[in-house]
Image: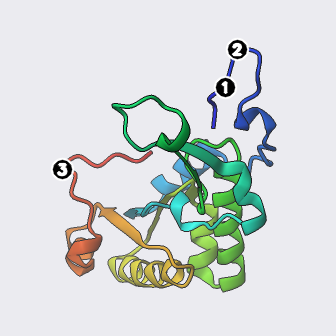
Amino acid sequence: ASAKASKDSASLNDCLYRGPVILDDLCGLLLRFRCNKIALVSDIEKAFLQIDLQKTQRDVSRFFWVKDPGKPAEGDNIVTYRFKRVFFGAVASPFLLGATIQTHLKRSGGEVAEKIRQNLYVDNVITGESTENRAVQHYLQAKGLFLGAGMNLREFYTNSSEVRSKIEEKDQGMSPEPRVL
């Protein structure tokens, strides 16, 4: 999206409206996270690719593909495709993802949806709970909330071995040294 045909031409990103910044204050998010006894961090799998582009907007996301890289990029050796999903790298993508998730969480309602909404940074949920039981319930409800949007919340990390034992193995993060943001 940032590629230009020539030095003096505009890129797709130059022509797109970025949208308002709707990310929560990072400092506040990290402070809230540290106030929890039980940490719970997760990631939305392939988040940008879960959001459809409207059919009327797909023409601006066209790109060329060379069929055979060993031949000249001309004529029948070039195919034109269109993205059907929000793609990473477009200046508007973070807004489109954030607005979609925020709208879904607001419509879903409930304590866990609101907590996630306030503790979301792009495709990372950085939150926690006061007890192991509440953390397990948070995990289960959060999975359900995102499944309702056709998204998979995964790579869960926690500082509690009891909570980790209740998280399905396929949902657990595998890094031996997890990082928050």
Contact (Cβ within 8 Å) of mark 3 with mark 2:
no
Report the residue marked by disc 1: 4
Q: Are marks 2 and 1 in contact (CB under 8 Å)?
A: yes
Q: Nearer the viewer, residue 19 or 58?
A: 58
Identity of the residue drawn at 72% across and 72% down = 103
Count every numbered label the image shows and give the total: 3
User: Which image quarter is the C terminus in?
Assistant: top left
* Disc with the residue nearer the chain's start (3 vs 2): 2
Residue 158 drawn at (x, y percent)? 31, 63
Tag 2: Cα neighbours inside 10 Å, few (<14), some, or many (≥20)? few
Three-letter amino acid code at the position of disc 3: Pro
- Residue beneath disc 2: 7
Residue 139 found in image quarter: bottom left
Mark drawn on residue 176: 3
Position of residue 86 measured from the top left corner of the image (x, y, whole percent): 61, 57
On the rendered structure, is 30 left or right of 177?
Answer: right
**Up-down: is 155 above or below 95?**
below
> 47 and 102: which one is in front?
47
**If the image is split into quadrants, where does the N terminus sit?**
top right
Dot 3 crowding, Cα within 10 Å, few <14, some 14–19, many 20+: few
Query: Which amino acid, mark 1?
Result: Lys
What residue lies at 29% left-to-right and 72% top-to-bottom? 171
Residue 86 visible to an observer of this rendering: yes
Marker disc for residue 83: none
The residue closer to the viewer here, 25 or 62, is: 62
